[in-house]
Image (cartoon, helix red, strand yellow):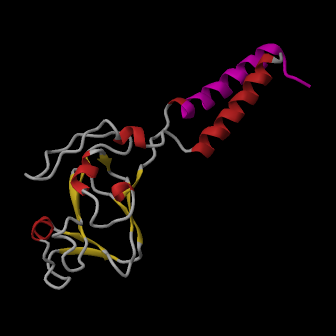
Amino acid sequence: MLPSPPLQMVACSLLLFLLLPPLLFRPAAAAEYTVGDGPWDSGTNYAVWADKHAFAAGDILVFQYVKSQHNVVQVTESTYRSCDTGGGVAGVVKTYTTGFDKIQLTEPNTTYWFICDFPGHCLGGMKLAVKVSGAGAGAGGGGSPPPSGVPLHPTSRGAAARSGWPAVWGSLTLAVLVFVINYCIAF
């Protein structure tokens, strides 16, 4: 048995009030970037690649490579510039060796520095500097300018690369909203 029309109207209004905000005000999801748009190797200009993206805190870099031929080493700026880890210890923040490394950029207003520590690879161009903006995922730009020689990343593609909302949550909310609207129209 359906409630009386005024009570049903109140119930419908309340349900719509609760369901519409998640559809309208949803947090942006972090973007995931395959470094160089392909394998981590010496054939890619990583400075040009990085210039095409605006990175935000929460974004994820995916390094794909043959682990017997390359690695990914997060380093300090001075080690990035010199390409010299002093045998793997000087200026090394963290070393990755799986061949499929996912690295989350957690700190806003920070430049992350990555190199390949195999002999000659860094000097041959296997190095990447990523400037993370001060804004959260979904917003590019902002923050202080990078150190000299490090490209500033434009905001035009970073936001476009992000998923605006998780598909499951959006689909579920939309399905419930359609059900509520159909119920409300039925009276």
> Could you say which is closer to the camera, residue 53 or residue 69?
69
Is 32 located above or below residue 92 in the figure? Answer: above
Residue depicted at 7% across the width and 51% down the height = 148
Q: Quadrant of residue 14?
A: top right
Q: Quadrant of the C terminus?
A: top right
Is 47 located above or below residue 63 in the figure? Answer: above
Residue depicted at 32% across the width and 48% down the height = 56
Q: Is residue 87 left or right of residue 25?
A: left
Residue depicted at 33% across the width and 79% down the height = 69
Is 138 located above or below residue 66 in the figure? Answer: above
Image location of residue 21, percent across then percent down: 55, 30
Total labels: the figure holds 0
Image location of residue 126, percent across then percent down: 24, 66
Q: Residue furthest bottom?
A: 87
> Could you say which is closer to the camera, residue 96 or residue 42?
42
Q: Is residue 30 left or right of residue 16?
A: left
* Most common secondary structure along the magenta stretch: helix
Q: Quadrant of residue 103?
A: bottom left
Q: Is residue 32 left or right of residue 145?
A: right
> Could you say which is closer to the camera, residue 83 or residue 110?
83
Q: Is residue 149 left or right of residue 32?
A: left
> Could you say which is closer to the camera, residue 184 or residue 40?
40
- The verdict on residue 13 being magenta is yes
Q: Which residues are magenta?
A: 1-23
- The verdict on residue 163 being magenta is no
Q: Quadrant of residue 172?
A: top right
Q: Residue furthest right?
A: 1
Image location of residue 131, percent across then percent down: 23, 52
Q: Quadrant of the N terminus?
A: top right
Q: Residue furthest front?
A: 43
Image location of residue 143, percent across then percent down: 19, 44
